Image: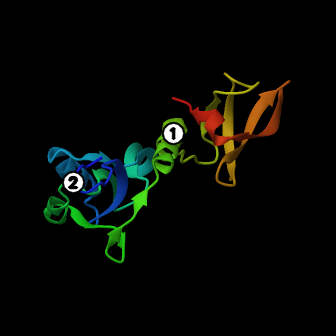
Amino acid sequence: MNRETGIEAVPQWYLVQSKPRQAERAAANLVQQGYSVFHPQMMVERIHRRRRVMVEESLFPNYLFIRLRRWVDNWYPLRSTRGVARLVAFGREPLAVHDGLIEEIQRRLEAAPAELNLCPGQKVEIIEGPFRGLEAIFKVHQGERRAQLLIELLHRQVTLTLPLADIRRSA
């Protein structure tokens, strides 16, 4: 608690908008200035020059979170930091983001598998559930989180639907 103003100096998360395609630069520059920054990213499989590659992409393009104490920290350098467009505010007041929301985003990112780009006919391995260890052939996506596979059981091809989190591409 600040004796002069009576205001508690509890750090809170705030939302920062970066300039287009400069979120990484903004995060690096803010960290270099001593700020605590959270830039949520996840690994995603993309096709680049006809090859499948894993790339890290921003969960919220052009946005990141910064932890500041409302009446204690110096907020002025934020405006002139390379890559930063502005601190997101409603009117003239920046709106704090609840710690619980940041913790939930972090928890989900830690638990989330990399997004799979699979083609029909591609071999996959089942890594969870009763069919763990079996190889299968990817048939088709069923919604965003499930896949239809062909596996061989008792010398017959059987169609099976599993969550994408339970399979991975075979090497």
Q: Residue at x 15, y 48 (%)?
A: 33
Q: Residue at x 28, y 51 (%)?
A: 69
Q: Position of residue 47 (x, y in %)?
A: 43, 51
Return the residue found at the far bottom.
91
User: Label 2 sits on what residue type?
Assistant: Glu
Q: Is residue 85 left or right of residue 90?
A: left
Residue linked to disc 1: 107
Residue 49 visible in the shown view: no
Badge 1 or badge 2: first in the primary sequence: 2
Residue 4 - label: 2
Q: Is residue 125 above or below residue 25?
A: above
Q: Is residue 120 left or right of residue 1?
A: right
Q: Residue at x 22, y 63 (%)?
A: 84
Residue closer to the observer: 134 or 167: 167
Residue 143 - label: none
Residue closer to the observer: 147 or 99: 99
Q: Position of residue 18 (x, y in %)?
A: 28, 63
Q: Are marks 1 and 2 in contact (CB under 8 Å)?
A: no
Q: Position of residue 100 (x, y in %)?
A: 50, 47
Q: Is residue 156 above or below residue 37?
A: above
Residue closer to the observer: 154 or 21: 21
How many marks do you count on the picture? 2
